[in-house]
Image (cartoon, grey):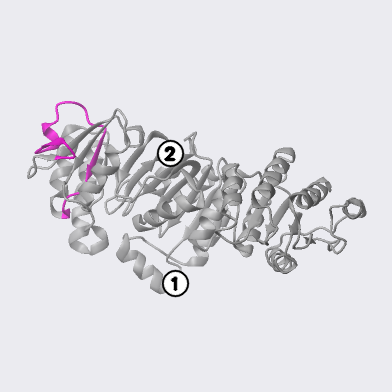
Amino acid sequence: MNLKRIFNPKSIAVIGASPEKKSVGWGLMKNILEGKSRRKVFAINPYRKEVFGIKCLPSILSIKSQVDLAVVAVPAKIVPKVVEECCLKKVGGIIVISAGFSETGKRGKKLQEKILRLTKKAGIPLIGPNCLGIIRPSIKLNVSFAPVTPEVGGVAFVSQSGAVVDAVVDSSLLRNYGFSSLISYGNEAQLDICDFLLWLKQDKETNVIAVYLEGVKDGRRFMRVAKEVALKKPIIILKAGKTEAGIQAASSHTAALSGSAKIYSTAFRQSGLIEVDTIEELFGVAKALAWQKKCRNGAAIVTNGGGFGVLLADYCQELGVKLPRLSRATIQKLTKSQLMNPAFSKRNPLDIIGDALADRYQVAVEALLKQKNIHSLFIIQAFQVMTEVEKNAKIIIQAQKKWKDKPIISVFLGETLSRPGINLLEKNRIPNYSNLKMAALVMKKLIQ
């Protein structure tokens, strides 16, 4: 099914547009109009004169020109009538934001089945119901009631839950996440996770796909499609509803058909997907895969805080990330440098001592990356009075440019004082993590 008119619409009709602040219809109009594009936007509300200065029309059938995308935000009981009018209008696609369908029980399920029959008969793709909508930052398209539009990036996020998208969008502004697309698909009455994976497979802006999943309708199709897409683009997946309590919650949330966590994990592994356990891991791994190259197993750690190096070494061993011994040549190179503190550790992790300035980091980084069986590098910075945060970041950026095939993961610990360096690193596509275990997990996922 062609989804072009949904994901790149030239005209949008908001059915249920509202001037009432903080309502869904108000939020949709606000986000769509903030795109400042040449798209035509129509406000449909028979009970209002205008919304955001746009004259309200009583029905989508009142529009004389073609409509690519219809967004529906009206009470569930009148959604079938609205969808029927959209089908008569021959719109390019429909997004039903409204809740109150199969996630609520038998009555809601009947309403959902009715709108599905209508869209199938008309051959019109449908997203939802019970969803947040879609966002494509690169073309300034925000057809959702999310709080803000995130930055542009190479990660696509597909989520059954709209609230999860809201939270991710909010946190992305502080954590330097950028997105190619965000898709909240709710009850997946018609279009499902497989349809979106196939669309993202051919989307040139998407490098990595992150998925929040509660359940799937057709397990065999999902495995087949996921395996096909994962051969071209990495898919990281967070499966919710692994416990009995979670399964019950999922069924009342998006009417998702859940199942055994072990069965899902096996299916994910067989399909070549990368499974994670938390939202933080989902986007921590996605960011690294979008920015860094895959590598062989063999990492080095350079740190100005010995204890942090020991902790990271423990996490690496737990996860199977190998830490090769430093070669005699590497140790000699470090020992001969007048910049090194005589008390440096002479092993991996390489502790360059707390008084390390940027030039000592530079000596250590270059010596380690030159060693042939070191294929990647962690750089830990624990902030001290003398720490040169931005200079350290610039050294790391230059090293990454020189050794393009050896991924570097920075661990600039702390928030306020380290923030200028972290921002500089991530603007240059070097991921930073303030959690040591997360850094080790991310490196594990980079190993091919």
Residue 104 in the image, given as x and y percentages of width and height: 23, 63
Pick the residue in front: 144 or 92: 144
Three-letter code for the amino acid on which mark 2 is drawn: Trp
Q: Which mark is residue 243?
A: 1
All told, the count of numbered labels is: 2
Look at 61% across and 50% down and name the residue there. 421
Pick the residue in front: 345 or 182: 345
Residue 203 in the image, given as x and y percentages of width and height: 47, 35
The stretch in magenta equals: 51-76
Based on the picture, tell me whether residue 56 belongs to the magenta stretch: yes
Look at 22% across and 64% down and name the residue there. 105
Label 2: few (<14), some (14–19) or many (≥20) C-alpha neighbours in 10 Å: some
Pick the residue in front: 219 or 414: 414
* Residue 271 seen: no
Q: Is mark 2 on a helix, strand or loop?
A: helix
Look at 63% across and 54% down and name the residue there. 445
* Residue 98 seen: yes
Label 1: few (<14), some (14–19) or many (≥20) C-alpha neighbours in 10 Å: few
- Image quadrant assignment for residue 134: top left
Three-letter code for the amino acid on which mark 1 is drawn: Thr
- Give the left or right position of residue 17, taking residue 413 as reference: left
Pick the residue in front: 188 or 286: 286
- Give the left or right position of residue 287, taking residue 382 as reference: left
Residue found farthest to the front: 385
**Chain-order first, disc 1 or disc 2:** 2
The residue pinned by badge 2 equals: 199
Residue found farthest to the bottom: 245
Based on the picture, tell me whether residue 29 belongs to the magenta stretch: no
Residue 22 in the image, given as x and y percentages of width and height: 22, 53
Q: In this view, does 359 lie above or below 103?
A: above
